[in-house]
């Protein structure tokens, strides 16, 4: 097959995908559409009662998205997280734990937390859902729920700091640090599907003996040291008031609707569970970027469908090329921002580069490439994501290496420039997604990059 026709229409396909960012008339909430009313009938819910609860399939899909955000938010519930069960991690000495004991406690808790997050397919689904515009009411709920979850995480951050006789300067500072934790965890939850080695433990001695640390635990330790301050006499513990639960949504549901939505949620999670035997088996009508059909591309490019099929024998091949192009655009943006920040600052400092990368694009912009995350086992998609990772990591490693040499520092024994680069990449990617959802915005991503490097390196 000639390459020329495919090259010609790839530009039109990319334009059409970008138009999706401002397309307000979407045909369906795509991810929720993995569950239909017929699926609920098959699960034993009477069809007649379904249509008494929801007039249309679309109304059901919207409510399912709202329910997923309120009840699951594609993350573990707080009461299921490791810091809720820490009896076995009690310090052996009386009173407050020693620095060495505290390191052991932090490493164990956060190592377990990383395993929980990486094993939870719902975290990956959240990232994939950001490949589509949010419906207006869904966006409101997402922001409310994520803001409340960040406040809950901030409360735990303050408690962890207090265990080390440290505190955060203010409530806002605690929530900022929680946002940084969230970003690292979110970045790792996506990256490990395409770069499994980021889940491997790192053995590091911070002066109290060698301990196995997950990357999430290393970042947490760095943030605790870099953003908290020693408790001064008379300091009052920081109290973070939890926001009120979102109103005007769940109270509208009847008990029967809630029961049905819970059944639908279980069906939904089972459909997209991280099971290699099931990936790629989505319904053709609700596949990745389902609105990008051959017919729509043909209409947009003002050619026949046969012309498009001459370029791509299958829609799958068309989408694989689209992902390549979307990720190539992203690489150019990143590399351009790295180069521009380097030129503007006259040095290889991390903070301005990090802030520039986190702020790439509009906060409301939709990145269609994220939609492909729903199928991490697709060989073509895995190849594209890995190629992007390799290019970006090479650039970040180079930047970090020059920065470390200029500042007279080197990674601590057990830590490599690769580890620093992965944490940096996850901080930026997670920060971009958090900025998109609007649960919380912070200006401390650049400072966080400096803190990670400062705490995980030593003078040469």
Image (cartoon, rainbow, N blue to C red):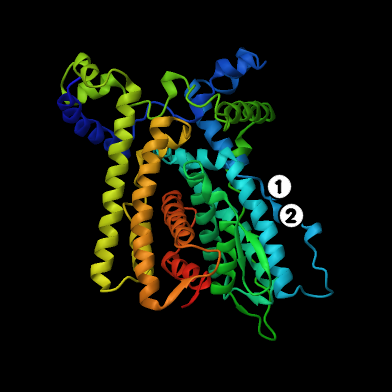
357 left or right, relative to 298: right
Q: Which mark is residue 84?
A: 2
Task: Specify the quadrant of the image occupied by residue 337.
Answer: bottom left
> Callout 2: helix, strand or loop?
helix
Q: Write the residue at 36% across / 38% down.
A: 384
Residue at image point 46% right, 19% down: 283
User: Residue 359, can we see it?
Assistant: no
Q: Are marks 2 and 1 in contact (CB under 8 Å)?
A: yes
Above or below, comparing residue 287 to residue 92 in the picture: above
Residue on which the image places disc 1: 80
Please name the residue shown 46% across and 72% down the image.
410
| Disc 2 residue crowd, few under 14, some 14–19, many 20+, Cα 10 Å | few
Q: Is residue 350 above or below residue 419?
A: below
Residue located at (70% from left, 58% from top) = 108
Q: Position of residue 392 (x, y in %)?
A: 35, 52
Badge 1 local density, few (<14 within 10 Å), some, or many (20+)? few
Relative to residue 330, is residue 137 drawn left or right?
right
Q: Nearer the viewer, residue 388 or 414?
A: 414
Q: How many marks?
A: 2
On the image, the x and y values in percent for residue 329 come to 27, 45
Rendering coords of residue 447 (x, y %): 44, 70
Quadrant of the rendering where the N terminus is positioned:
top left
Q: Is residue 138 left or right of residue 92?
A: left
Q: Is residue 120 above or below residue 360?
A: above
Q: Secondary structure at mark 1?
A: helix
């Amino acid at each position: 097959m000639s390459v020329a026709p495919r090259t010609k229409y790839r530009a039109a396909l990319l334009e059409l995908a970008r138009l999706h960012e401002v397309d307000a008339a979407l045909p369906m909430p795509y991810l929720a559409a993995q569950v239909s009313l017929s699926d609920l009938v098959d699960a034993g819910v009477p069809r007649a009662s379904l249509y008494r609860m929801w007039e249309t399939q679309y109304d059901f899909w919207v409510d399912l998205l709202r329910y997923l955000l309120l009840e699951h938010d594609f993350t573990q519930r707080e009461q299921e997280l490791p810091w809720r069960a820490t009896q076995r991690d009690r310090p052996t000495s009386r009173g407050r734990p020693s620095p060495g004991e505290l390191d052991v406690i932090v490493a164990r808790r956060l190592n377990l937390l990383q395993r929980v997050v990486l094993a939870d397919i719902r975290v990956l689904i959240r990232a994939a859902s950001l490949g589509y515009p949010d419906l207006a009411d869904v966006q409101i709920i997402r922001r409310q729920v994520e803001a409340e979850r960040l406040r809950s995480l901030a409360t735990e951050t303050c408690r962890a700091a207090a265990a080390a006789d440290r505190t955060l300067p203010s409530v806002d500072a605690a929530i900022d640090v929680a946002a940084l934790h969230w970003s690292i965890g979110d970045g790792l939850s996506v990256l490990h599907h395409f770069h499994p080695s980021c889940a491997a433990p790192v053995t590091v001695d911070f002066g109290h003996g060698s301990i196995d640390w997950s990357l999430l635990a290393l970042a947490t330790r760095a943030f605790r040291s870099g953003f908290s301050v020693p408790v001064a006499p008379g300091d009052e513990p920081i109290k973070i008031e939890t926001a009120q639960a979102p109103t005007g949504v769940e109270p509208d549901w009847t008990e029967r609707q809630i029961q049905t939505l819970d059944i639908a949620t279980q069906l939904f999670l089972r459909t997209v569970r991280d099971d290699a035997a099931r990936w790629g088996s989505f319904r053709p009508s609700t596949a990745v970027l389902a609105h990008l059909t051959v017919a729509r591309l043909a209409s947009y490019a003002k050619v026949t469908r046969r012309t498009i099929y001459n370029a791509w024998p299958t829609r799958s091949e068309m989408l694989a090329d689209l992902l390549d192009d979307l990720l190539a655009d992203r690489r150019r943006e990143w590399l351009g921002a790295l180069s521009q920040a380097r030129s503007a600052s006259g040095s290889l400092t991390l903070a301005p580069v990090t802030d520039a990368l986190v702020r790439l694009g509009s906060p409301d912009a939709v990145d269609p490439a994220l939609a492909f995350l729903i199928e991490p086992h697709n060989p073509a998609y895995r190849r594209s994501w890995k190629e992007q990772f390799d290019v970006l990591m090479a650039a970040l490693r180079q930047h970090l290496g020059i920065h470390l040499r200029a500042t007279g520092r080197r990674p601590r024994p057990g830590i490599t420039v690769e580890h620093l680069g992965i944490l940096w990449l996850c901080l930026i990617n997670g920060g971009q997604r958090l900025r998109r959802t609007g649960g919380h915005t912070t200006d401390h991503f650049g400072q966080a990059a400096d803190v990670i490097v400062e705490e995980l390196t030593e003078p040469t």
